[in-house]
Image (tube, rainbow, N blue to C red):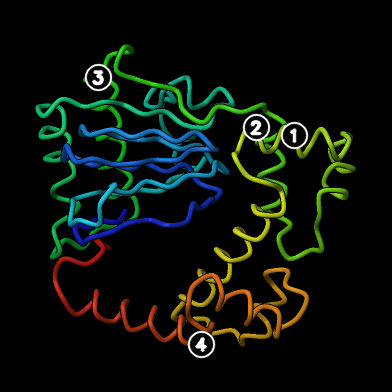
Amino acid sequence: MEYMTDPHKMRHWHVHPQYEMYFCPQGISQCSLVNGQEFVYDYPCVILSAPYSIHSMSPTDEVAFERIVAYFGERTLGAVDKRLLPEELLSHKMGVMLRLTPSDASVLRRTLSPALETSAVLSEAERELYLLLFLHKLMARVPQERRMSIGTSDYYIQSVLRYIYEHIAEPMDSDCIASAFAVSRSKLDRDFRKCTGGTVHEFINACRLNHAKIMLSEPSREKSIARIASDCGFVSETYFFAFFKKQTGMSPKEYRCTAHARQTSSEEKPGGCCP
């Protein structure tokens, strides 16, 4: 679970294999993108994203604002009644936005307060319990008319997204993916763009970039740049360097140093990510 209040504007969408809960208790102007569907809103909300959905959430202007993000998987869901999540999210759809009243936002924010205290030292099980209590109150307070399905897609495209994510280290293009799913390349390209708003090639590159950022940010397992390039499916370390520099404005080494410095700062100062 991450608690943030700094100015933020996400310029790139991302994808991951877990469910995501994004909670903004403030009524500020925001723009979100889920599988190619973009929408702008100015009210407190919770956005629940399914695994392997393409998404980004950020304010329309780069301002300081409060948001809480949590990630959870099938293990967490398996331990509780799945009615804690909207049926729309679980039935092969990619996301649900729940519009909150100021009263809803205040109650839900207080529910998570103990888990967000910078002095709190919580176990993984305790963090899960706070998240599940939050979801329980969320479902109880927000009626169906204030829930909106977002970023829905054909089920096979969701499987394509997962396939790319899980095989990112391997050589990949539209032809091999189309073959794996027994469809023509033209159908894959057409359905993929319709459901995500981008191309297969763009998604593969974005996944490789995200994987590289994660590996470069890991403090305990510093792989070599060459190994990271290989593990993320780049054809060579030279190509990886040029691609990463173009996308981020930093070399992989510079990004690693910046990420580690940020982690150290968060650990030393209050207001960083909760444990």
Q: How crowded is mark 1: few (under 14 residues within 10 Å), some or many (20 or more)?
A: some
Q: Closer to the N terminus: mark 4 or mark 3?
A: 3
Residue 231 drawn at (x, y percent): 69, 72
- Residue marked by disc 3: 140
- Residue position for label 2: 194
Distance from disc 4 to disc 3, alpha carbons, whole Å, reads 47 Å
**Label 4 vs label 1: CA separation?**
37 Å
Q: Which one is closest to the eye, mark 3 or mark 1?
A: 1
The amino acid beneath tag 1 is Arg
Nearest to the observer: residue 26 or residue 132: 26
Q: What residue type is labelled 2?
A: Lys
Picture quarter containing residue 266?
Answer: bottom left
Side of 145 where 202 appears, left or right? right
What residue is at 16 percent from the left and 76 percent from the top? 269
Residue 198: % across, % down: 63, 44
Q: In which quarter of the image is residue 233?
A: bottom right
Residue on which disc 4 sits: 253
The residue carrying pointer 2 sits among few (fewer than 14), some (14 to 19) or many (20 or more) residues within 10 Å by Cα, namely some
Labelled pair 3, 2 in contact (Cβ < 8 Å): no
| Disc 4 element | helix
Mark 4 or 1: in front is 1
Q: Which of marks 3 and 2 is nearer the N terminus?
A: 3
Determine whether label 2 and label 1 are within 8 Å by CB: yes
Query: Of the residues shown, which amino acid type is indicated by label 4?
Result: Lys
